[in-house]
Amino acid sequence: MTTIDSNSNSNTQLLTGPAAWFDSLIEMSKKELLIMIRYPVEFIASFGQVFIIVTVLTLAGLMFSRGGLESAGDNSQTSGLVIYGFILFMFLSDTLWTIGYNVRREQKQGTLEQLYLSPASKFASLVSRVTVTLIWTGLLSISSAWLMSVMIGRLPFANIPLGAFILIMALCGTFGIGFAFAALTLRIKEAGQTMANMLQFAFMVLCAPFFPFSALPDWIRIISRFIPLSYAVDAFRSTLMGFPSGYPELAPIGVELVIVILFGLLMPLLGYWLYRREENQARATGSLSEY
Amino acid sequence: MTTIGKPSLSQTVSAALAETRLRLINISRYPGQMVLEVIIPIVFASMPMLLGRATAGDQAGANFAANTGTANYVAFLLIGSNVFTIVSGAFWHIAYWLRFEQETGTLEAIYLTPTSSVTLLSGVSLYSAIRSGGSAILAYLIGCLVFQVNPFEGNVLLAFAFILVGLVPLYGVAMLFGALVLKVKESNALVGLMQWVVSFLMGIFFPVTVLPPFVRAIALAFPPTWMTNGVRSALLGVGFFFGQWYLDMAVLWAFLFFAPLFGFWVFNRVETGIKRNEGVGQF
């Protein structure tokens, strides 16, 4: 029987270390990109979809303004609130949904077990699931921000470096949530999709991406304060809006930054630990290929 | 040699109902999904509601009334999101059924039975109407309870009539969409895009009168637009397109006769085309 020993020869040594990790991440991401471009309708549809969602939300918001459609373009604070929340929502949806969904797809196609027979990094495998999607979402975010600012008001752009830092930290945190969710998918299988939907809708209410936290009833706001992502949403849009009066709403910006940084650093570790734990459990019980 | 005759009407109905029953049993195995379908429209409607309340404050109702014709924005938005649930459900269920049969390789097997795919499609449509209609009504009642408005304001029976009459042309349009899925084979992307186009055209959170004339003309050629406005006018008195309920209802009846026949015709044509080109099993 042939065994693979990472110290046995030079070829297998190429499979370890940061260079090998990046190589495998790039190759795996390329594979995801290849799958993505094989479905051009999906590619175009996702773009069109974002524009229509933005338009629907904008028109809905304008129904509450004094001049209706004629007041479009007047209110930059409202546009900042909605657009920056929408951007975070798109990234969260991607990370939450895509990693678990891809693990599930490999399970259904029967290729998940085969992946575990290869010496390639499991972490790179998870990250690659979402890398291409995140680049695509970044482009979509820029386009939707432009469209919405045209429709409902000039977009406030204060403190861009700090805003970008908060976005990166929030993204790292949501990666962690994505890993944890992939772990959950390994355990609860098909019900994972329903759970992902539920989490997305819970996020839409509890983390207030499309409206200020002040719009929430007091008892819901208490729950929001226990979710780090709420602070990420609040800090991100408050920073980019230049801290207008009443913002940030949940805590002083210093406190929110500490929470967001801790979330960004610790959540990926926790999420990955949960994934590995669940994966080992699935391998031990032989349920890795069950679906 | 045994020949298989053309199925009788009762056999056709029986096959369609069997398909409906099969789908209903299947979804009953996922209670979490069913609960979610009731929650989604409420959460969805609450987004513009909370944004509007936060930005307009005490003037939210008055501003909304000036722009839409009713100060009851809670019911207006809930009606929009619930009719949207029914409409997007129709698209999802038809597309997902076809795609699922294609992916699992059973669509070709269906063509070997004496039951036509259109019969089964009718069964799926009935299942979809029961599932989405039930969720939408429940979501509307719960939503009104949560946001403390009276769900039985206005002419409830007339609102039901608009929904029931509107369902038939809706599934006719969904069959056109099913034909597109058979042809293009990317159901998720198409449904994802289509449901938002539909939400826009039917005026999910706004009256279609705010749309530019050209877009409004397209919206008015789409049955769910009449369905949504009919329900809103019956319950909230926002105003029928032609001033009287029976005129709007007559338009919906015209759709009722035309859309399903057109849907069947297009679906059959596409189906025959892909059968000739051996594309049924491809996905």
Image (cartoon, coloured by chain):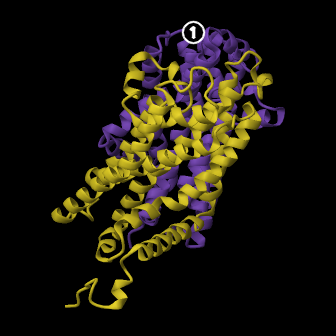
Q: Position of residue A188 (x, y in %)?
A: 27, 50
- Visible residue check, residue B279: yes
Q: In this view, does A44 lie above or below B157?
A: below
Q: Is residue A77 above or below residue A99?
A: above
Q: In this view, does A192 lie to the left or right of A98?
A: left
Name the tint of chain B in the rendering: purple
Which chain letter matches label 1? Answer: B
Q: Kindly give the residue lying farthest to the left in the view shown.
A: A285
Q: What element carries label 1?
A: loop
Q: Which chain is yellow?
A: A
Residue pointed to by mark 1 = B154
Q: Residue at x 25, y 84 (%)?
A: A5
Q: Is residue B272 above or below residue A210?
A: below
Quarter residue B51 falls in: top right
Q: In this view, does A183 lie above or below B50?
A: below
Q: Which of B81 and A207 is in front in this view?
A: A207
Q: Position of residue B36 (x, y in %)?
A: 40, 35
Name which residue type carries label 1: Gly
Q: Where is residue A20 in the image (x, y as percent from the top left)?
A: 42, 77
